[in-house]
Image (cartoon, rainbow, N blue to C red):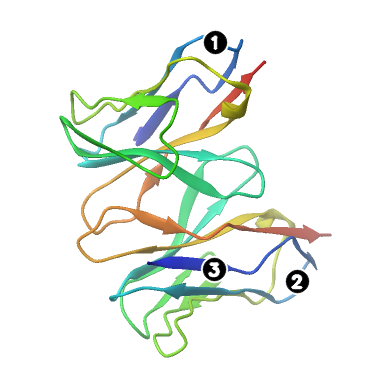
């Protein structure tokens, strides 16, 4: 079946460090891929998305590239801030479907 | 600019009590869903609906009921609350092939 695997957290970084959160997927077709972010005490917010191979999604300094050859959608940011501390979820959506399939989430903690 | 609205934000129940978590969206989305979020387990789908009058079970439906009488509303009912249902509950909605919009969650404790 379709699934999403994320690196386990927590990921702890110092401010201004480079961030990578790995995400790989298994899918029988060509999914759209998403990163959601959940700040403490809040719901999930869409961070970025990519709908086809080689697309790059970007928002708030975060980027992720849809790599079909490696079935990956790794999240990166060049210089993290304390305010980026949150839980990040990778997710996929199959074409003509409504149901998002989520990874288990990765907690990021950025220290000053 | 309401989006997805969940009420209440917090609730404490005793074992055996029943209650309804409310979810409303004002984006005319066809699809609505309920998730629970537990530590270390990510999000698990409880029930979902692809339109008014249509509902279906997700991964963890036991102990919960839903109905969809209108496009806007998708309430989740706990029939007889159990401590294992202590969790954070999220409602979400979307159009076809679109990412889901989430509410702010209901934090439910069952004693």
* Image quarter hosting the C terminus of chain A: bottom right
Instruction: Identify the residue shown where x is 49% and y is 19%.
Output: B8
Q: Please give the residue where the numbered disc 2 appears in the rendered image.
A: A16
Label 2 neighbour load within 10 Å: few <14, some 14-19, many 20+:
some
Q: Work out whether mark 3 precedes mark 2 in sequence or the reverse, and give the earlier one.
A: 3
From the viewer's perspective, tell me whether residue B15 is left or right of residue A47.
right
Residue B104: tell me if it is visible.
Answer: no
Q: Secondary structure at mark 3?
A: strand
From the viewer's perspective, tell me whether residue B6 is left or right of residue B48.
right
In the rendered image, residues at marks 3 and 1 fall on the same chain: no
Q: Position of residue B29 (x, y in %)?
A: 22, 41
Q: Chain of mark 3?
A: A
Instruction: Quadrant for residue B33, please give it.
Output: top left
Between the residue at mark 3 and the residue at mark 1, the CA separation in whole angstroms equals: 36 Å
Instruction: Quadrant for residue A111, please give it.
Output: bottom right
Q: On residue A5, which mark appears? A: 3
Between the residue at mark 2 and the residue at mark 1, the CA separation in whole angstroms equals: 50 Å
Which is closer to the viewer, label 2 or label 1? 1
Instruction: Identify the residue shown where x is 26% and y is 25%.
Output: B67
Seen in the picture, residue B86 relative to B33 is either above or below; the reply is: above
From the viewer's perspective, tell me whether residue B64 is left or right of residue A23.
left
Q: Chain of mark 1?
A: B
Which is closer to the viewer, label 3 or label 1? 1
Q: Position of residue A20 (x, y in %)?
A: 64, 75
Q: Please give the residue where the numbered disc 1 appears in the rendered image.
A: B16
Instruction: Identify the residue shown where x is 47% and y is 11%.
Output: B18
Instruction: Quadrant for residue A79, please give it.
Output: bottom right
Q: Secondary structure at mark 2?
A: loop
Are discs 3 and 1 less than 8 Å apart at CB? no
Label 1 neighbour load within 10 Å: few <14, some 14-19, many 20+:
some
Q: Position of residue B45 (x, y in %)?
A: 42, 44
Which is closer to the viewer, label 3 or label 2? 3
């Amino acid at each position: 079946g379709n699934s999403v695997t994320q690196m386990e957290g927590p990921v702890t970084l110092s401010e201004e460090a480079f961030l990578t959160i790995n995400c790989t997927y298994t899918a029988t077709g060509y999914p759209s891929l998403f990163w959601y972010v959940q700040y403490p005490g809040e719901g999930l917010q869409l961070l970025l998305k990519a709908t086809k191979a080689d697309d790059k999604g970007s928002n708030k300094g975060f980027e992720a590239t849809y790599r079909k050859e490696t079935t990956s959608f790794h999240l990166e940011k060049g210089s993290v801030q304390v305010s980026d501390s949150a839980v990040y979820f990778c997710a996929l959506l199959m074409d003509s479907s409504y149901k998002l399939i989520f990874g288990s989430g990765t907690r990021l903690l950025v220290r000053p | 600019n309401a989006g997805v609205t969940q009420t209440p934000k917090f609730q404490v129940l005793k074992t055996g009590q029943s209650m309804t978590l409310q979810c409303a969206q004002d984006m005319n989305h066809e699809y609505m869903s309920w998730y629970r979020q537990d530590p270390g387990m990510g999000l698990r789908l409880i029930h979902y609906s692809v339109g008014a009058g249509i509902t279906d079970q997700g991964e963890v439906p036991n102990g919960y009921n839903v109905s969809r009488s209108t496009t806007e509303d998708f309430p989740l009912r706990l029939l007889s609350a159990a401590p294992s249902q202590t969790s954070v509950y999220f409602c979400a909605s979307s159009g076809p092939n679109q990412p889901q919009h989430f509410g702010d969650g209901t934090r439910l404790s069952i004693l």
